[in-house]
Image: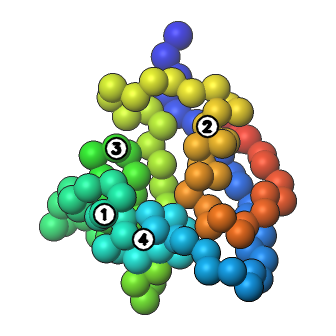
């Protein structure tokens, strides 16, 4: 059976932190940090939706050079299929280290 797609909705509550938080290649990170973390930008000139697209299935939209939306393609060719739990953990790896998971839902 082939999984055609999966949508994970993560509600992330960002809390204040007195220590510096690395956002390289994560939500809030800069475009240059995404290039450094995931490789050169593969975005086509006619792609108006995303500002950054990697070969690894990571796409991001930036506002004022901060990633405000990150989309992860979990069905990319060559990628191992993940369980719902593993996919959730992978998605959380894109949140800043000072973020707390508030709610996790899955829509079939």
The image quarter in which residue 99 lies? bottom right
Which residue is nearer to you in this view: 75 or 4? 75
Q: Residue at x 64, y 33 (%)?
A: 86
Q: Secondary structure at mark 1?
A: helix
Q: Residue at x 71, y 55 (%)?
A: 10
Tell which tag, 4 or 3, sits nearer the viewer: 3
Tell which tag, 1 or 2, sits nearer the viewer: 1
Give the distance between the C-alpha atoms of the residues marked 1 and 3, in whole angstroms: 13 Å
Q: Please tell me which of labels 2 and 4 falls first in the chain.
A: 4
Read off the residue under disc 4: 61
| Rendered location of residue 97, percent (x, y) | 66, 64
Which residue is nearer to you in this view: 1 or 34? 34
Q: Please tell me which of labels 4 and 3 falls first in the chain.
A: 3
Q: Secondary structure at mark 2?
A: helix
Read off the residue under disc 2: 87
Q: Which mark is residue 56?
A: 3
């Amino acid at each position: 059976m082939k999984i055609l797609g999966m949508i994970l909705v993560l509600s992330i509550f960002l809390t204040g932190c007195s220590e510096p938080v690395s956002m390289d290649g994560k939500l809030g990170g800069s475009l240059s940090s995404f290039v450094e973390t995931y490789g050169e930008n593969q975005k086509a000139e006619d792609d108006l939706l995303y500002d950054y697209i990697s070969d690894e299935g990571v796409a991001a939209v930036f506002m004022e050079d901060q990633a405000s939306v990150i989309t992860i393609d979990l069905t990319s060719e060559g990628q191992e299929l993940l369980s719902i739990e593993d996919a959730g953990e992978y998605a959380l790896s894109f949140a800043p280290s000072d973020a707390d998971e508030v709610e996790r839902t899955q829509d079939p």
